[in-house]
Amino acid sequence: MKYVVTFVVGGIIGAIVGALWIGPERVEAGGLSDEDVSAIRSTIESVVRATEAEDWATWESNWTEDAVTMYAHSPVTEGRAAVRESWESANVVEFSATPTVIDGRDGLAYASGAYSLTVGTESMPEPVTDRGKFLLILEEQPDGSWAIALDAASSDLPLPE
């Protein structure tokens, strides 16, 4: 009798775990289609290319109207125009952003990864390079593209002495 009860209880637990594992939540891993992931990668690549080319109209098209940036050692910047102005004035010499995780569902996604950024101005003796990590929150647009709603980044480098 003890073995029958163990077998029945084990079977019930197995059925529950199996149902949870293959249930509707698991069918779409992360909830994003391959097309969504590709579109998000394209948005990030477009921002990088547009930044390096100083193509601010293209750059701006990849951000939501109410976009927000949160960067280390800087105040929060709100609104696409203000975000563009801060990037435009940064005098970016070189920029890369490599997403390592992209996930989301229901028209909302996040991407995280690593960045490298070199900026320089006439007032600087040499350009300054920073590298670190970023977290983007993106919103799906009516045309199926994805736009950045929030960009948060922090440096991996120690503060200068």
Image (cartoon, helix red, strand yellow):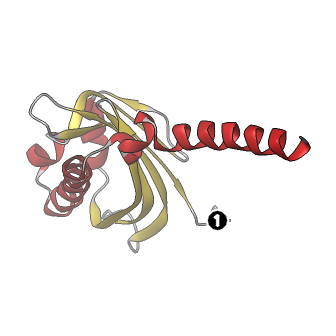
Which quadrant is the N terminus positioned in?
top right
Left or right: residue 85 compared with residue 60: right
x and y, in percent, of residue 104 in the image: 38, 40
**Would residue 35 be seen by someone viewing this image from the given angle?**
yes
Judging by the rendered image, the residue that carries numbered circle 1 is: 158
109 vs 105, nearest the viewer = 105
Which quadrant is the C terminus positioned in?
bottom right
Q: Is residue 158 above or below residue 14?
A: below
Q: Amino acid at mark 1?
A: Pro
- Residue located 44% across and 59% down the image: 113
x and y, in percent, of residue 46 in the image: 17, 55
The secondary element bearing badge 1 is classed as loop
Q: How many marks?
A: 1
Furthest residue toward right? 2
- Give the crowd class for mark 1: few <14, some 14-19, many >=20 residues within 10 Å: few
11 vs 113, nearest the viewer = 11
- Residue located 28% across and 61% down the image: 92
x and y, in percent, of residue 8 in the image: 74, 39
47 vs 12, nearest the viewer = 12
